[in-house]
Image (tube, helix red, strand yellow):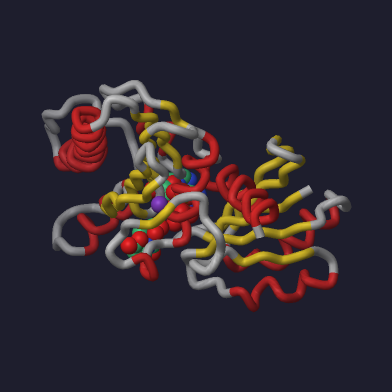
Amino acid sequence: MILTVDVGNTRIKAAVFEGDTCVEGFVFDKTELGKCIENILEKFETISHLVVSSVGDVERQSFLAFETEVTVHFVSHEDIFPFSNNYGTPKTLGIDRMVLAAGATLLYPNQNRLVIDAGTCVTYDFVDENNVYQGGAIAPGLRLRYESLHQFTAKLPLLTLESSESYVGKSTVQSIHSGVVNGLVYEIDGFIDEYKAACKNIIIILTGGDADFLAKRLKNTIFANSNFLLESLNQTYQYKINND
Ligand SMILES: Nc1ncnc2c1ncn2[C@@H]1O[C@H](COP(=O)(O)OP(=O)(O)OP(=O)(O)O)[C@@H](O)[C@H]1O
Ligand SMILES: CC(C)(CO)[C@@H](O)C(=O)NCCC(=O)O
Ligand SMILES: [K+]
């Protein structure tokens, strides 16, 4: 069994895999990292490998303690990835984006793939049908949009995520929800339309903490899988083991 751990910008997600099957998933705060991993390793005694991808401030050292129990692998730019990289600054490409691109490459062979990760940031990652990673986009995520409207103005309240009834906001609260929710929905639909116009054969995967909320509201019908980063981490690690 493999324990995959995704240290995001805000929180940590983990999942236990038996082969390609996810047995159980977990979400926890960074302050609970050690204890939570310990509990998972206790619950699933046959976990032999721990694979981590981190874009947060949690470093490799935080996992050293588990090396007596399991093989620990911290995904880095030096790993083998199943695509060639045409990004202008490959060393600064986020590890999460690389893992998502790798997962899309392995799970959806021989086609253009676009992965949209709606988390703290909304990232777009495009791997073409020749397995070349071409790049994408980075934008603020839903929660970040609500927080920045509040933080950088004098009058706007801090709201939490809610559906927007209409694109015409009739109050301050409705206007903020419309601007944040409809704004991001139109933005994602706009990007999808551009990619679809440019490539015929394209699969689009929507993932991240806000994937389910957003998928329902998009004009484009696309496949939402909020677990895609952890699944990709599992796939990328198996690819590494088989190709090292
Ligand atoms: N308990 C929660 N804490 C934070 N965000 C949450 C929570 N529940 C739902 N969300 C939603 O999930 C989004 C964050 O997604 P996610 O958990 O994928 O982010 P993350 O941990 O920062 O990961 P990443 O850095 O990979 O984006 C927020 O925009 C928010 O709307
Ligand atoms: C964009 C984020 C913050 C999304 O988690 C992460 O992928 C990151 O820190 N990226 C580095 C910049 C880049 O990907 O070009
Ligand atoms: K993200």
Q: Which of 49 and 44 is in front in this view?
A: 49
- Left or right: 168 with respect to 40? left
Q: Where is residue 39 in the image (x, y as percent from the top left)?
A: 79, 57
Q: How many numbered tags mark residues here?
A: 0
- Left or right: 46 with respect to 87? right
Q: Position of residue 33 (x, y in %)?
A: 65, 65
Q: Which of 122 and 74 is in front in this view?
A: 74
Q: Which quarter of the rendering shows the C terminus? A: bottom right
- For residue 213, say whether it is visible: no
- For residue 28, say whether it is visible: yes
Q: Where is residue 69 in the image (x, y as percent from the top left)?
A: 84, 66
- Left or right: 70 with respect to 202? right
Q: In this view, does 81 lie above or below 223?
A: below
- Left or right: 87 with respect to 10? left
Residue at the far right in the pictured view? 45
Q: Position of residue 217 (x, y in %)?
A: 31, 26
Residue depicted at x 73% and y 65%? 35
Residue depicted at x 49% and y 33%? 108
Residue depicted at x 63% and y 50%? 239
